[in-house]
Amino acid sequence: MTGAESEAHRLDKADPGHRHLFHVPPADGGRYPEAAYLAGNSLGLQPRATRAELLADLDAWGSLGVEGHLEGQRPWLSYHELLTGPVARLVGARPTEAVVMNSLTVDLHLLMVSFYRPAGRRTRIVIEDAAFPSDSYAVRSQARFHGLDPDATVLRLRPRPGEDALRTADVTDLLAAEGDTIALVLLGGVNYLTGELLDIPAITAAGRAAGAVVGWDLAHAAGNVPLALHDWGVDFAAWCSYKYLNSGPGALAGVFVHERHLGRADLPRFEGWWSTDAATRFEMTPTSRPPATVEAWQVSNPPILAMGPVRTSLELFDSIGMPALRERSLRLTAYLERLLDEVTAGRPLTVVTPRDPARRGCQLSVRVGAGSAGELTKRLRHEHGVIADAREPDVVRFAPVPLYSTYHDCWRVADALAATVAEVTP
Ligand SMILES: *Cc1c(COP(=O)(O)O)cnc(C)c1O
């Protein structure tokens, strides 16, 4: 064992994390039985607690039938309320401001029904040029829905030439200069590709000062970085639960709407029977009575068997706490960064994630030779048991997540990269 590898083991003893709470896939190759799983930014690992909790919900259906709506350990009618406290604490929301429902892009559309209201000169939507494609398609289709030309309506923020990250001042300057044409700012809190954490409070303040509505896609931020959506004055936000929130493939999403918009009769919303006040829902009246909470944005009754894994995972975050996870995340990512700096020196590899820990979550993105991201990722997996995530053509993403990643996982990444990517001979 090399000195560097024993150092990794030493760090793991001193700072063990919570790996024992998760199922870790076996390695597909290499010298170690378990995979070094660095793809929690794409699909989080399964908590060991999830199976029993899910089976208990399934058993309630088996033993209670329709009576499960009102009876049993977790009656289905109010099941979503079990998730409200933990999800609100996770994102810094009041309990009236957060709910788990649908999937992410669907929720973005439901929120844009309320919060994208182009009028007069104020029609444009600001996104990042490197936005996740689903968000780009969503806002372009919203523009078309309002009879607008998506190319003229969607303004894409680009880093300065030669840079990989956006600068906060460039974004706030743009909002100040062109704010009267902007209806909606909809950015990723942590960019899926570069791992850049935007200055959410500063950009929110600048967008609102310019008269725009400011929403955030927190797919890569929820469960990765601490959030204070209420205090930051964010208008609305949505995030999925299958990345850092470990709730399983396609898991339900979370939604935040700021208190100042709750109960507003002037905001359009698409409604269904779950949009009406729960106390009078079964009076079966033809018109709804929406509550003055984010639950007014719910449409359908939730899929209970899909809520279970989200509940289990949120309870885990709630009991450990985001501040402690962020602390460990900063330590792990700094360690991986140091190892990557050693490996990338002299190789055709560049870390493109911001160097300032305050400007990123746990993910570090490495630019590799054009067209080689997929091939490199395959070799890491099959020759070294390292599971990373390729974004073609040229980015490989590594996310040491504080819940279950180890220092030894980080060491394996660096060791595998060194063995896989040839040194550049001068
Ligand atoms: C993962 C991700 C999505 C995925 O959208 P779904 O509706 O959950 O399929 C959307 N936007 C961003 C920014 C993402 O990172």
Image (cartoon, grey):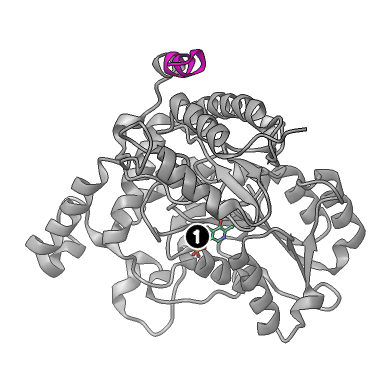
Q: Amino acid at mark 1?
A: Val
Q: Residue 245 colored magenta?
A: no
Q: Position of residue 162 (x, y in %)?
A: 84, 47
Q: Is residue 234 left or right of residue 328?
A: right
Quadrant assignment, res 20: top left
Residue pointed to by mark 1: 294
Q: Quadrant of the C terminus?
A: top right
Q: Image point 48% across, 52% down: which residue?
A: 96
Furthest-front residue in this view: 425
Residue in front for this viewpoint, 228 or 262: 228
Residue in front for this viewpoint, 153 or 23: 23
Q: Position of residue 148 (x, y in %)?
A: 75, 83
Q: Is residue 321 left or right of residue 376?
A: left
Above/below status of 129 relative to 16 = below
Q: Main secondary structure of the magenta part?
A: helix
Q: Image point 48% across, 36% down: which residue?
A: 401
Q: Position of residue 189 (x, y in %)?
A: 64, 49
Above/below status of 385 relative to 272 = above
Q: Is residue 219 visible?
A: no
Quadrant assignment, res 186: bottom right
Question: Callout 1: few (<14), some (14-19), or many (20+) C-alpha neighbours within 10 Å?
Answer: many
Q: Image point 7% across, 61% down: which residue?
A: 63
Above/below status of 5 relative to 270 = above
Q: How many numbered callouts? A: 1
Q: Residue 5 colored magenta?
A: yes
**What segment carries the magenta color?**
1-10
Q: Position of residue 422 (x, y in %)?
A: 62, 37
Quadrant assignment, res 68: bottom left
Residue in front for this viewpoint, 53 or 420: 420
Furthest-left residue in this view: 63
